[in-house]
Amino acid sequence: MTQGQQHDQELRAAARHFGRRRFLTVTGAAAALAFATQLPAAGAAAAAELDARRLTEDPFTLGVASGDPLPGSVLLWTRLAPRPFEPGGGLPARRVSVHWELARDERFTRTVRRGRATAHPEFSHTVHAEVEHLEPGREFFYRFRAGDWTSPVGRTRTAPAPGDRPAGLTLAAVSCQAYHDGYFTAYRHLADEDLDVVLHLGDYLYEYAVNATGGARAYTDRTLPAVFNRETITLEDYRLRYGLYKTDPDLRAAHAAHPFVVTWDDHETENNYAGGTPENGVPPEEFLLRRAAAYRAYWEHQPLRRPQLPEGPDMRLYRRLRFGRLAQFDILDTRQYRSDQAYGDGWQVPGPASEDPARTMTGAAQERWLLDGWRASGARWNLLPQQVVFSERRDRPTADFKVSMDAWDGYPASRRRILAGAAAAGVENLMVLTGDVHVGHGFDIKADFRDPSSRTLGTEIVATSVASGKDGADRPANHDRLMQANAHLKFFNGRRGYVTVALTEDSARADFRTVPYVTTPGAPVTTAASFVTEAGNQGLRPV
Ligand code: FE
Ligand code: CA
């Protein structure tokens, strides 16, 4: 039995033991306990060691990654999985010693740091190496070694020193990569961009079944195993699914090229869940077990630091990163703590239930953390990487309009508190970065979305999907209706791709990069449109 299967069995046993009613109140603790038995104790490794020299197949099939850059530190990631489509990745339940190396140059002639990390079977043989005491604002190259095997080389960057005023910062924002909807061609192009950091805004994977031919990829040269042809529920399912996604060469190229800062949306767990409430009628205690499995697999497979390690169904994903005095990133989690969607979710006419001031998108603690962080910021640009559309988005220009109950439109009181908090904190240059809707958008954030003459408080850049939605179209069927209905909506494009944002002291420039198709590989990338907003003079202007 693999670690994942064993874990799933333990959770089911815990659920039976506590009984449904009582279990409801102790689920968090029970799930945390079930997971805790999986954690290797500090200093005393639970599993025996496998001599890495006995690895007869390349264990670095899932590539390398780095993430969450700090001024003096980077987080390096890899996973040992000689056979990623098998439970356990084709390795026995033993720990493996892995060496890492960080250098100033790609050929590793100027090595600045070396170290050793343990790939624990309890964490799917993933490695999360935090390399400290590095020079700020510098580019580095890294690689791993296990036995006779050496990983591909990754490139990363530390953040600038806290007091620094870097001349510029260029980021890319991506979201929504349904493997079964198409190729990750956008990532191939993103890997070639000159970037400081990539922000992943959620839907890194989808829980839905992937058939033998990879859905819209329509493989003719390979057959995916049946293990992917079902919805992900258990820890083993989620781990295997990350394995499938990370075998994509374009995704691996993007991770190797740039540090990533990731946050999730719904599909890493389940479509449109809200806090502890599942999409469908599954009992909440069962859903929390699923959430615990999904969160754990997410942490294992992302370049995340130790403070983000989940405890059962809880994971502190919201966090703050600074790039000198130029930019502060407050990375939100709008899934884990939100109130349930009003009016049964979907597009609905707003009303008393959605406008209830008690409703929250962030939870009280995260909201407080955000507003406190803004008060202490002092950064030129305050960026808010998060998941769902922040600006009002009406579906039609008539009085009977509907809005999405899953987006901030379904939580307007929460949005008002955030905007009031930004104003009170003296945040001048606010830019919200969003994913989720599988189209590119540019919004002006208005003090009153229903009054076009009201003050513009910031801008919102919505990154289209990498693959979700298949090929798409430059002008989707609802293009004109949405543009008419929302005067503050400055851009709408329905192709796949990503967005780059170049920040300087004076301005922010957004380039919406799109590919014309994803259901066959090899599409070129072009810029669909570019916009600039000036520091101290918010509002998107086409360039
Ligand atoms: Fe999505
Ligand atoms: Ca989503």
Image: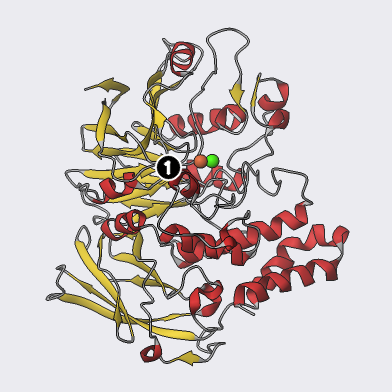
Q: Give the crowd class for mark 1: few <14, some 14-19, many >=20 residues within 10 Å.
A: many
Residue 248 in view in this figure: yes
Q: Position of residue 475 (x, y in %)?
A: 39, 21
Say what secondary structure mark 1 lies in.
loop
Residue under label 1: 467
Residue 534 in view in this figure: no
Tell me how the rendering is colored.
Answer: secondary structure
Compared with residue 524, is residue 147 higher up or lower down, i.e. above or below?
A: below
Nearest the viewer among 19 and 224 is 224
Nearest the viewer among 1 and 36 is 1
Residue found at x 27% / y 33%? 511
Q: Position of residue 365 (x, y in %)?
A: 59, 48
Asked where in the image residue 250 lies, by quadrant, the reply is bottom left
The answer to whether 282 appears left or right of 203 in the picture is right
Q: Position of residue 530 (x, y in %)?
A: 25, 27
Residue found at x 49% / y 32%? 389
Compared with residue 49, is residue 332 higher up or lower down, i.e. above or below?
A: above
Residue found at x 69% / y 43%? 279
Nearest the viewer among 492 and 310 is 492
Q: Quadrant of the C terminus?
A: top left
Nearest the viewer among 376 and 243 is 243
Q: Position of residue 64 (x, y in %)?
A: 34, 66
Count of numbered marks: 1
Q: Amino acid at mark 1?
A: Ala
The residue lying furthest to the left in this view is 109
Ligand 2 location (quadrant):
top right
The answer to whether 110 appears left or right of 245 in the picture is left
Q: Is mark 1 within 8 Å of ligand 1?
A: no
The residue lying furthest to the front in this view is 220
Q: Quadrant of the N terminus?
A: bottom right
